[in-house]
Amino acid sequence: MQKIVIKKNIKECLDLFFVFSKIGLFTFGGGLAMMPMMQRELITKKKWITEEELLDYYAIGQSTPGIVAVNVSTFVGYKQLGSFGGVIATLGMITPSLIVIMVLATFINSISDIPLAQKALKGINVAVAALLTTVIINFAKKTIKNWWNFLLMIAAFILVFFFKIPSFILILFAILLGVVNTFIALKKNKKDGK
């Protein structure tokens, strides 16, 4: 019985590691660009989390120190296998990047002079822009549920894009708004006797 449990845990750990290694290896452009692949791998294929959980993990990962994709992998790993799962998923996410960065660092001076490499990087940038557009549309569908949410999104965009307000200030302000909104809703429910 003990051997079966150990084999199952090893299989789950390897599965967690390789799923996040795949995500880390085949996505370019950072945390949000990884969203479509995370949705496909973690929600559709593995059914480890729901859409709402992924959005929550991204929101928390965005408002905590560190790389968003790594934070998300840690949350998912923790949900699957506890603290050890968080470590395994995190290692899975960062291992491909470490290997690619070490290889590129060796050849970076010679790559920057190759026209084909420069064109490939431009193509990757276009693909990342398309992926980010898809992510934004999916985020908007899931999170904008009324006019108030829509106006907040537009205001945040204007503040960041035109007025160059740092995004962490908007995140802190959004957290404050969420807490105040929840407090008001709880007070109203208590007053109404619900």
Image: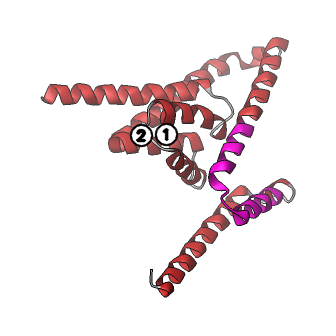
Residue located 66% across and 43% down the image: 138
Q: Nearer the viewer, residue 66 or 126?
A: 126
Q: Nearer the viewer, residue 36 or 163?
A: 36
Q: Is residue 153 above or below residue 8?
A: below
Tell whether label 2 touches label 1 (CB within 8 Å): yes
Query: How far apart are the two marked residues, 1 and 2, measured between alpha carbons?
Result: 6 Å
Q: In the picture provided, is 17 more to the left or to the right than 102?
A: left
Residue located 52% across and 43% down the image: 72
Residue 130 position by quadrant: top right
Q: Which residue is mark 2?
A: 77
Q: Secondary structure at mark 1?
A: helix
Q: Locate the N terminus by quadrant.
A: top left
Q: Is residue 98 visible?
A: no
Q: Is residue 158 above or below residue 109?
A: below
Q: Which residues are magenta?
A: 132-159
Residue 184 position by quadrant: bottom right
Mark identifier at residue 73: 1
